[in-house]
């Protein structure tokens, strides 16, 4: 794995994106066939998370990919309060147990790992590889690729309108997370927020919810993400770390 990484970081990132998307889609389908949500996905996600973290640590890449203590002035970033707003959206319309207790535990485990994996792959590997030539293009490509990656949810039985809304706000959130990583050189705020957003979806009260609930939530996510990203860009112009 190190030889491929040293040879071409972009190819390394794209290969990991392919492995991640295909493997998780297969695992979700197999879990559905077995009749227990995330029964296969959770251990696979945990294994991938462990593999990537150990590899990053072993090759002394923790600082490069933002897995280090936060060294910025949190006040400059409004104490990351907008991230709390983003994390809360799945509970806007109430709380309910959508899965069995066992399935909920598996779901939360897999989503916590997904938060780490997607941030490392899209914000870490892909963005860092692309920004070596053009930072602005890297931000756009990383954000759009992250959003479009959610189209795979159609293969897992999601509705088209729901998936399109998810792609839209995922691009906006991806843009915000990329800006945060670019400016702070730390990935933990993104990993934590991403993991919470995903995990709380297991308890979202969406059964029978009208389409406008999804549209309102998507608009809110886009508005907060883009507004906060613009605020960070304007308030940290002197802190171009890359």
Image (tube, grey):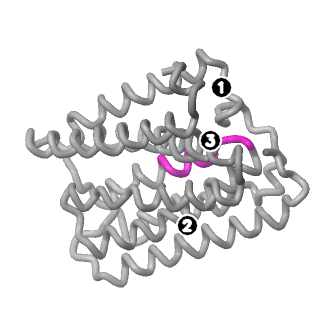
Q: Earlier in the sequence, mark 1 or mark 3?
A: 1
Residue that numbered label 3 is attached to: 129
Residue that numbered label 2 is attached to: 172
Please report the residue visible at 85 percent of the width from the left and 64 percent of the height from the top.
Answer: 235
Residue 30: image location, x then y, percent: 15, 40
Would you say the residues marked 1 and 2 are in contact, meaning their CB atoms lie under 8 Å apart? no
Residue 10: image location, x then y, percent: 55, 40
Q: Earlier in the sequence, mark 1 or mark 2?
A: 1
Q: Is residue 186 magenta?
A: yes
Please report the residue visible at 55 percent of the width from the left and 59 percent of the height from the top.
Answer: 143
Outermost residue to the top: 58
Residues at marks 1 and 2, CA–CA distance in whole angstroms: 27 Å
Q: Secondary structure at mark 2?
A: helix
The crowding category of the residue bearing disc 3, from other C-alpha atoms within 10 Å (few below 14, some 14 to 19, many at least 20), is some
Q: Is residue 222 magenta?
A: no
Would you say the residues marked 1 and 3 are in contact, meaning their CB atoms lie under 8 Å apart? no
Label of residue 217 in the image: none
Residue that numbered label 1 is attached to: 61
Please report the residue visible at 41 percent of the width from the left and 66 percent of the height from the top.
Answer: 167
Residue 7 occupies which quadrant of the picture? top right
The crowding category of the residue bearing disc 2, from other C-alpha atoms within 10 Å (few below 14, some 14 to 19, many at least 20), is many
Residues at marks 3 and 2, CA–CA distance in whole angstroms: 21 Å
In the displayed structure, 118 sits above or below 145; it is above
The mark closer to the camera, 1 or 3, is 3
Residue 232 occupies which quadrant of the picture? bottom right
Q: Is residue 13 left or right of residue 163?
A: right
Please report the residue visible at 35 percent of the width from the left and 34 percent of the height from the top.
Answer: 45
Q: Secondary structure at mark 3?
A: helix
The secondary structure making up most of the magenta span is helix
Q: Secondary structure at mark 1?
A: loop
- Which span is picked out in magenta? 185-195
């Amino acid at each position: 794995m190190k030889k491929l990484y040293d040879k071409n970081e972009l190819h390394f990132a794209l290969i990991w994106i392919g492995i991640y998307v295909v493997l998780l889609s297969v695992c979700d389908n197999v879990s559905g066939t077995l009749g227990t949500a995330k029964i296969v996905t959770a251990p696979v996600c945990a294994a991938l998370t462990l593999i990537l973290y150990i590899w990053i640590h072993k090759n002394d890449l923790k600082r490069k990919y933002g897995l280090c203590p936060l060294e910025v002035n949190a006040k400059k970033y409004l104490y990351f309060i907008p991230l709390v707003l983003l994390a809360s959206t799945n509970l806007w319309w109430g709380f309910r147990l959508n899965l069995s207790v066992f399935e909920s535990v598996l779901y939360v485990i897999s989503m916590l790992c997904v938060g780490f994996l997607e941030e490392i792959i899209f914000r870490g590997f892909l963005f860092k590889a692309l920004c070596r030539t053009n930072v602005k293009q890297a931000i756009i490509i990383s954000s759009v690729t992250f959003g479009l990656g959610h189209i795979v949810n159609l293969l897992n039985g999601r509705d088209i309108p729901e998936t399109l809304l998810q792609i839209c706000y995922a691009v906006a959130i991806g843009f915000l997370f990329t800006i945060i990583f670019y400016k702070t050189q730390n990935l933990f705020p993104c990993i934590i927020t991403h993991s919470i957003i995903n995990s709380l979806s297991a308890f979202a009260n969406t059964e029978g919810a009208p389409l406008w609930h999804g549209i309102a939530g998507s608009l809110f996510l886009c508005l907060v993400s883009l507004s906060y990203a613009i605020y960070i860009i304007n308030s940290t112009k002197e802190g171009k770390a890359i």
